[in-house]
């Protein structure tokens, strides 16, 4: 780490202007990090430059669980006060002064920085395990102040530069442009220097460390786009990042304001907490979206890709003042992601997606559970989907040209600043010469979702919705399945909607659905069929090896259940299929193979071992949860599975942690299972037993 101390004083003379908050304006921060992943610590230093706007007797930083070894103001040691959450520097700062503050520290982040794989013996297997060992950050809602003294308040915008020292075998990705990588043969570590040109809120600071290669693209405007991937996933690059350049070029054109940062990076990380996160210039996303071409129809990255990219303008360039204005982030990113999907998949896809979200919002509203978009505690559904609908209606109300002009003025006026919903509405009123009080009352303040307005919009703008509502209101007009499938006037989305509303199907109707050219209609047939009758056996078998892993999973189980004498045949045909990133086909296959006595009986122990293996931390939570569930249902949990479950009860993803705790509680209430768990617990570290101890103490 000696190089970290040396590099701590690089580039200290560079200074640019940022935004201000209260009496002190923090301009620039240079951060120097030496992660200690095996200890789950961060050794760091930060140099802040700031201007004093008014006389003040202290400055402070949010700093969670840190030990400080040095604090210097303008080269002189200075007294400071530390709590578990902050560090404060007391000094008589005078208006008009400029200062340089150096802080060196050790951080022990309890959240926000995630050290993946360092507790497992995976180092020798990094060539075969896609993710290997990683360190990555997730600041939204958790705050960067767990790994660097910074500002939890979004209104403090600073130009942050990062220097990171790490084992040279790993790749480092962070905000901004990589200026330099320093690597010497005699040294184990390499130093990576990243530069930002513009200020941002500190929750958007991020870095990722791991084994990566990258694909490099150029946008039409000349922006470099770097798409990262694990070395073993080179064949998944195209389907994972499909349409990336098209999306980037479309958003720049549609928004009408140039992409505001130096470059753009997308990085898959293991065990991520969400689908994606829009760190400034560096989106991190769950590696569960790293897919092959067959997976694309069932689960693709297109929407997340567009959503996080849109945030580079809406959230990163222009940032909310506080959570009351969260619509300005999520509603806008959702809306522009839908427009990007419209560009990629067509108009009908866009309008039917809006229709689906409107139905959901309407159902919630009918239950009295609707929410205002200005409610800081509103659900994601409200901020994202109702928020997108509000923009759809606003554009329809004031016209596309004025809407685009307003968006451009809003972004240009408030770039690198913080805003309120009122700021946005004022701009749109000025540009459109419209009084938007009624719009605001209904769509922003109101808790009830305006379904009639949504319906009217769809009928006016979508031919297939105009036809859909006409059919729905015409009691004399009914369509048979054949009518729906053969009517050339019906769009594919409308056909699917009408079929989904029909309920059950006869064998003859199912036969027609199975033979349809539209994969989604074939998927519908796979879902609708129960125990497969002999008459459909021949026609439905091709779905087993079709172009959808979800359909393969459905058909494997249904064929296996319906035709006992052919169980071995169905297993043999699907033995090499893994499925989606959640390994949906493989996990089901292993379970069925174990339950088919005459299918490779000597291999059953290996099938069980493999299924148990998928409960380990080397796999993403979706894989682990399914493996746990199958093992529980067939009563095949063993000591390794129990150990993995105990560890999972402390997982950083709350969704997976809650599942693991619920399953654990169920097992704990069974005396035999409880005894097995206690045996395993005796062999685990104390840190793995946090949740178990709550049971012992209750």
Image (cartoon, rainbow, N blue to C red):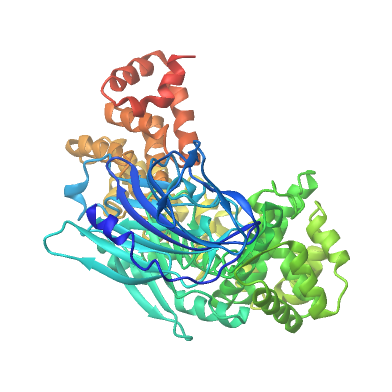
Tell me if 460 is positioned left or right of 124 in this view.
Answer: right
Question: In x, y percent, where is residue 554?
Answer: 44, 50
- Residue 414: name its quadrant: bottom right
Residue 120 in sight from this viewpoint: yes
- Position of 95 with respect to 272 (left or right) is right
Q: Is residue 138 above or below residue 367?
A: below
Direction left: furthest residue: 186
Q: Is residue 143 above or below residue 228?
A: above
Residue 169 lies, in percent from the top left, at 21, 59
Eyeballing the image, is 463 above or below 370? below
Residue sitting nearer the eye, 364 or 547 = 364
Query: Which residue shows up at 44% across the image and 33% down it?
Result: 660
Residue 302 location (% of width, % of height): 49, 67
Instruction: Locate residue 570 relative to residue 93 in the image: left or right.
Output: left
Rendering coords of residue 284 (x, y %): 44, 59
Q: Which is nearer the eye, 518 or 509?
A: 518
In the picture, measured across the screen, residue 600 lies left or right of residue 339, that is left
Quarter holding residue 176: bottom left
Residue 484 visible in the snapshot: no
Q: Along the line of sight, which residue is nearer the eye, 158 or 6?
A: 6
Q: Is residue 393 above or below residue 6?
A: below
**Total numbered circles:** 0
């Amino acid at each position: 780490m000696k190089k970290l101390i040396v590099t701590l004083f690089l580039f200290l003379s560079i200074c640019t202007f940022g935004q201000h908050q209260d009496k002190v304006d923090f301009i620039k921060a240079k951060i120097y990090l030496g992660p200690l992943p095996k200890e789950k610590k961060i050794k760091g230093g930060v140099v802040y430059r700031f201007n004093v706007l008014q006389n003040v007797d202290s400055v402070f930083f949010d700093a969670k669980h840190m030990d400080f070894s040095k604090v210097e103001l303008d080269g002189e040691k200075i007294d400071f006060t530390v709590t578990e959450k902050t560090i404060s520097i007391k000094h008589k700062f005078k208006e008009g002064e400029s200062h340089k503050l150096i802080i060196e520290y050790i951080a022990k982040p309890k959240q926000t920085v995630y050290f993946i794989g360092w507790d497992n013996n995976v180092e020798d297997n990094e060539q075969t395990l896609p993710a290997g060992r990683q360190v990555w950050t997730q600041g939204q809602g958790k705050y960067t102040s767990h790994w660097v003294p910074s500002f939890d308040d979004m209104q403090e915008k600073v130009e942050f530069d990062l220097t990171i020292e790490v084992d040279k075998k790993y790749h480092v990705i962070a905000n901004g442009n990589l200026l330099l990588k320093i690597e010497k043969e005699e040294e184990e570590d390499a130093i990576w220097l990243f530069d930002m040109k513009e200020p941002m809120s500190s929750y958007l600071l991020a870095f990722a460390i791991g084994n990566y290669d990258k694909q490099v693209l150029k946008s039409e405007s000349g922006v470099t786009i770097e798409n990262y991937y694990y070395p073993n996933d080179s064949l998944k690059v195209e389907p994972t990042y499909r349409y990336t350049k098209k999306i980037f070029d479309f958003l720049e054109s549609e928004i009408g304001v140039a992409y505001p940062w130096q470059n753009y990076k997308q990085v898959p990380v293991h065990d991520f907490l969400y689908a994606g996160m829009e760190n400034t210039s560096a989106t991190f996303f769950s590696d569960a979206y790293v897919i092959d071409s067959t997976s694309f129809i069932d689960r693709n990255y297109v929407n997340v890709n567009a959503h996080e990219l849109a945030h580079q303008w809406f959230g990163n360039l222009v940032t909310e003042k506080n959570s009351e204005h969260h619509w300005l982030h999520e509603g806008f990113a959702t809306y522009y992601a839908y427009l990007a999907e419209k560009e990629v998949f067509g108009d009908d896809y866009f309008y039917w997606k809006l229709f689906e979200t409107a139905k959901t919002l309407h159902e919630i509203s009918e239950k009295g559970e609707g929410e205002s978009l200005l409610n800081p505690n509103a659900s994601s559904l409200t901020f994202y989907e109702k928020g997108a609908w509000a923009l759809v209606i606003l554009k329809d109300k004031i016209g596309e040209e004025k809407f685009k002009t307003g968006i451009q003025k809003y972004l240009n006026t408030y770039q690198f600043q913080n805003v309120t919903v009122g700021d946005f509405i004022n701009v749109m009123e000025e540009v459109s010469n419209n009084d938007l009080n009624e719009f605001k009352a209904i769509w922003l303040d109101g808790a009830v979702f305006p379904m009639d307005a949504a319906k009217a919009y769809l009928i006016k703008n979508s031919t297939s919705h105009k036809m859909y509502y006409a059919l729905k209101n015409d009691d004399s007009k009914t369509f048979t399945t054949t009518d729906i499938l053969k009517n050339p006037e019906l769009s594919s989305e409308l056909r699917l909607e009408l079929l989904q509303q029909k309920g059950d199907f006869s064998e003859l109707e199912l036969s027609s659905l199975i033979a349809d050219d539209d994969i989604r209609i074939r998927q519908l047939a796979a879902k609708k069929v129960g125990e497969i009758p002999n008459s459909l056996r021949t026609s439905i078998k091709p779905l087993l090896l079709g172009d959808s892993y979800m359909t393969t999973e459905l058909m494997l189980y249904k064929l296996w259940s319906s035709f006992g004498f052919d169980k071995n045949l169905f297993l043999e045909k699907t033995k090499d299929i893994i499925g989606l990133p959640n390994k949906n086909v493989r996990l089901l296959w292993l379970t069925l193979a174990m339950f088919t006595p005459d299918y490779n009986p000597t291999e059953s122990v290996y099938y069980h071992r493999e299924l148990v293996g998928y409960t380990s931390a080397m796999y993403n939570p979706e894989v682990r949860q399914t493996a746990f569930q199958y093992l529980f249902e067939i009563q095949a949990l063993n000591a390794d599975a129990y150990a993995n479950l105990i560890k999972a009860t402390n997982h950083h993803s709350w969704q997976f942690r809650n599942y693991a705790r619920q399953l654990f509680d169920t097992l704990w209430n069974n005396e035999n299972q409880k005894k097995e768990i206690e045996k395993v617990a005796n062999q685990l570290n104390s840190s793995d037993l946090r949740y178990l101890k709550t049971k012992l103490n209750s």
